[in-house]
Amino acid sequence: LQPNKSQIEPRLSLETIRAIEYIRSNLSIQLTANEIADNLYVSKNTLAKNFRHEVGIPIGKYIDKQVFFEAEILLTKSSMSVGEISSALGFCDQFYFSRRFRQLFEETPLAYRKRVRAFTT
């Protein structure tokens, strides 16, 4: 017996779906829950509570994960410099971006790019 699709996939409210779409189309480390709530015309507290309940992590952490996922893609699939990537993702400077990247991945962005590209070629 196969479970039906609704039993596998969690149901997200329209508000949470719209928040995720807003995050994807305005991806930046500087994006805040306040900005998202203002643009969706909802209460910040309600958005934060519902998002965490439905997605399983706070909205700020979700934004961080999406930013660094995009950073991984840009490092491996583009020829953009670390400075260009950090600027594109809303970081104040490439040194802060590199420091945050290193905290998460335990290597610098350039070392990550070199390792992944060597592995995939």
Image (tube, rainbow, N blue to C red):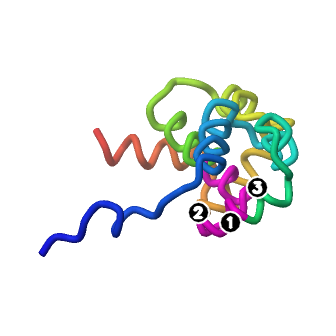
Task: From the top left corner, tell me how far across and down residue 61 is, in percent.
Answer: 70, 60
Which tag is nearer the camera, tag 2 or tag 3? 3
Query: What amino acid type should be assigned to the residue bearing mark 2?
Result: Val
Residues in magenta, as a range: 50-66
Dot 2, how many residues are within 10 Å of its Cα: few (below 14), some (14-19), or many (20+)?
Answer: some
Q: CA distance from mark 1 to mark 2?
A: 5 Å
Residue 63 falls within the magenta-colored stretch: yes
Residue at position x 59%, y 64% from top? 54
Residue at position x 28%, y 38% from top? 121
Query: What amino acid type should be assigned to the residue bearing mark 3?
Result: Leu
Task: From the top left corner, tell me how far across and down residue 28 is, in percent.
Answer: 73, 37
Q: Between residues 93 and 6, which one lies in front from this camera angle?
A: 6
Query: What amino acid type should be assigned to the residue bearing mark 1?
Result: Arg
Residue underneath mark 2: 55
Q: Between residues 104 and 22, which one lies in front from this camera angle?
A: 22
**Position of 84 relative to 43 (above/below):** above
Residue underneath mark 1: 52
Report if the CB atoms under discs 1 and 2 are less than 8 Å apart: yes
Residue at position x 33%, y 48% from top? 119
Which quadrant of the structure image shows residue 46?
bottom right
Task: From the top left corner, tell me how far across and down residue 41 is, in percent.
Answer: 82, 39
Residue underneath mark 3: 47
Please state if 64 lies on the left or on the right of 110 as rendered.
right
Dot 3, how many residues are within 10 Å of its Cα: few (below 14), some (14-19), or many (20+)?
Answer: many
**Position of 108 relative to 48 (above/below):** above
